[in-house]
Image (cartoon, rainbow, N blue to C red):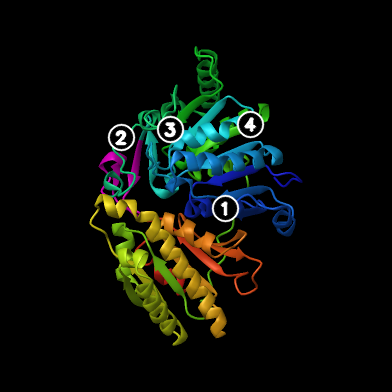
Amino acid sequence: MTTSAPLYGWYGDDFTGATDTLAVLAQAGLRSMLFMGVPSAEALAAAGPLDAVGIAGAARAMEPDAMRIEMSAVGMFFQQVAPPVLHYKVCSTFDSAPHVGNIACGIQTLHPFVNNRWVPIVGGQPSLGRYCAFSNLFAAAGTGGAVHRIDRHPTMRQHPVTPMGEADLRLHLARQGLEGITALHYPLYDTNADASTNALDAALQDLLDNDDAPRTMAPTLLDLTTPEQLATVGRLLWQQAQKARLLAVGSSAVAQALVAHWAKPTPPAAPPLTLADGPVFAWAGSLSPLTAAQVQAATAYQRIPVDAQRLGNDPAYAQTLLAAICTGLQQGQHVLAYTGPTDGTAANITSAEQVAQASANLVDRVVQAQAEHGTPLRRIGIAGGDTSSHVVQALQLWGLSYQTTLCPGVTLSRARSQDPARDGLELMLKGGQMGGTDLFAKLLGEG
């Protein structure tokens, strides 16, 4: 599936999810690069020929006006590059709200830059324990954990910024302003291959033919409950993308579906992760119970608790933390700094972006201090979607390429930077719901 022009473009609404899509495509043999914003001509030239071009963004944490500004520039870029499929990569739990990370706003912003009326929204990702049945989303609580309907999920129902109070994704997105959502439900996929193809084709054509409103957009939610359904969904997407360039919405299951349809050979196992070359620095900015358990299990690290509110407001406190982290690293210890839970008040929620930015600034200062000391970091890990997005921006990287997969949904990438001290930095970015409790041990390359 290699070509002189990209087959696939994607915009990730946070950096952690964007690297998961990078991993899916790279493991399938596609020449793939994830850029940290709309790439310059120089960055594109440095990346070389690509089959898949990604842009990592931060729309998940943005208000609608800011989303429109960022995503309009993304849309214009992909209109020029013209991949048949433009994937708006959203979190697999679809957590979003009218006022922040509004998925409907993102769809409405990107859609004018493609040609196809149809907007498929892929609702599940079985590889991560995400299942969409009859338009309702279900999600596992942690890797291999119990599966809950998303509005009853122990973490997502009480997310501090975007709590999920509705499991039917049609209603969830309609409340954000996406009108006229139709659906294709999984029983259509579960007949034999020929019957499934015919039934889905007929159902989709019926939806498009009977759209009685003169809209330029026809969004359709697609169930996804098993890995076996991926190729069927991918065929439907690719078939429509051959007619006109297509905007597809969803988690990395969009990429998985197309790869399955293209019948790529089974990818080899991810290359083994070697032992870290020197001390590893990790920062956990996620407030999820799973991340808390991962921090608790990280006994190979010097663990340094961080007062998130003081970090965002007290420069002297940040300086003290910097000194403590660098002292540990320069003594040859792995260091894990982690923020604790807040009390969930409106003031704390309002300051979440401030805290993420302050965290990113401190991580950047640690990387710089270690380089100046003559002991540059070669591997770091960041937990938390918003924190990861801010950290990568603060590090002033221009791109990420795939290195290996630590566990489903968690990728180790290799950084590209104009700064020789940062070029080649190994970087793990993970969302709050991803990984087993031994994740930070795995980051060390200890098996």
Which of marks 4 and 1 precedes in the sequence?
Answer: 1
**Label disc, if present, on residue 241 of the rendered structure:** 4
Q: At which x and y percent is residue 435? A: 39, 59
Classify residue 20 as left or right of residue 174. right
Which of marks 1 and 3 precedes in the sequence?
Answer: 1
Q: At which x and y percent is residue 200? A: 52, 24
- Report, in whole angstroms, how far the alpha carbon at label 1 lies from the one at label 4: 20 Å
Which of marks 1 and 2 precedes in the sequence?
Answer: 1
Q: Is residue 185 above or below residue 93?
A: above
Cβ atoms at labels 2 and 4 below 8 Å apart: no
For the point 46% across and 66% down, which residue is it? 361
Residue type (three-letter) at the residue carrying disc 4 = Ala
Q: Secondary structure at mark 1?
A: helix
**Label disc, if present, on residue 22 of the rendered structure:** 1
Residue mark closest to the camera, 3 vs 2: 2
Which residue lies under the disc numbered 3? 223
Residue mark closest to the camera, 3 vs 4: 4
Q: Secondary structure at mark 4?
A: helix
Disc 2 packing (10 Å; few <14; some 14–19; many ≥20)? some
For the point 66% across and 42% down, which residue is it? 77
Classify residue 224 as left or right of residue 165. right
Disc 3 packing (10 Å; few <14; some 14–19; many ≥20)? many
Q: Secondary structure at mark 3?
A: loop
Q: Quadrant of the N terminus?
A: top right
Residue type (three-letter) at the residue carrying disc 1 = Leu
Which of marks 2 and 3 precedes in the sequence?
Answer: 2
Q: Nearer the viewer, residue 388 or 32?
A: 388
For the point 31% across and 63% down, which residue is it? 309
- Which residue is farthest bottom? 331
Magenta residue span = 137-154
Which of marks 4 and 2 precedes in the sequence?
Answer: 2
Residue type (three-letter) at the residue carrying disc 3 = Asp
